[in-house]
C-alpha cells in the first residue's frame, strides 16, 4: 500500500499547542500512522460527512481521506468532551 501524505489545517495545528506534552507525543504518532493506514481499526465515519474520527486516549482526531490523491487532511484535534460538544469543523 502506498503512503498517504498528511496535511494538517492551521486551526488543527494551533489546537496541538494546547495539548499537554505527555499526550502530544502519542497524538503525533497516531497522526503519523495515518500515512500507512488512513482507515485504522477503531476509526469511525462521521454521519452526513466524508470525515472520520479516531481516538487517542481522551483525545479525538477528525480527518478526511482523499484516496485519489493519497492524502489525509486533519481538521480538528481536541479533548473528547470538546469534540463531542462542538459541531465538527467544516
Image (cartoon, rainbow, N blue to C red):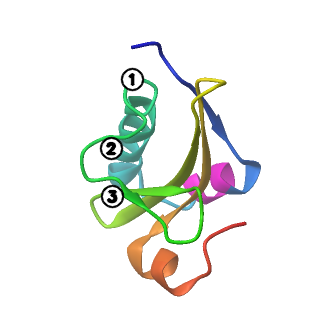
- The relative height of residue 29 versus residue 11 in the rendered view (above or below) is above
The structure residue drawn at horizontal position 48% and vertical position 16%, both measured from the top left corner, is 3
Q: How many marks?
A: 3
Magenta stretch in the rendered image? 12-17
Mark 1 lies on residue: 36
Position above or below: 81 against 48: below
Q: For this view, does 66 lie left or right of residue 1?
A: right
Report the mark closest to the observer, 1 or 2.
Answer: 1
Give the residue number, with chain letter if any, for mark 2: 26
Kindly check if marks 3 and 1 are in contact, taking CB atoms under 8 A apart as contact. Answer: no
Where residue 9 appears, as percent x and y from the top left, is 71, 47
The residue furthest bottom is 85
Please give left or right for residue 28 compared with residue 22 in the image.
right
Q: CA distance from mark 1 to mark 2?
A: 16 Å
Q: Is residue 2 above or below residue 18?
A: above
In the rendered image, the quadrant that contains the N terminus is top left
> SS class of the residue under badge 3?
strand
Instruction: Name the residue at the top extreme.
Output: 2
**Distance (Cα) linking label 2 and label 3:** 11 Å
Choose the circle earlier in sequence order: 3 or 1.
1
The earlier-in-sequence mark between 1 and 2 is 2
Amino acid at each position: 500500500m502506498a503512503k498517504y501524505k498528511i496535511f494538517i489545517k492551521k486551526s488543527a495545528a494551533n489546537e496541538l499547542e494546547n495539548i499537554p506534552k505527555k499526550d502530544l507525543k502519542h497524538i503525533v504518532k497516531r497522526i503519523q500512522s495515518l500515512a500507512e493506514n488512513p482507515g485504522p481499526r477503531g476509526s469511525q465515519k462521521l454521519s452526513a460527512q466524508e470525515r472520520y474520527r479516531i481516538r487517542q486516549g481522551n483525545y479525538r482526531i477528525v480527518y478526511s481521506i482523499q484516496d485519489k490523491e493519497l492524502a489525509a487532511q486533519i481538521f480538528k484535534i481536541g479533548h473528547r468532551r470538546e469534540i463531542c460538544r462542538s459541531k465538527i469543523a467544516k
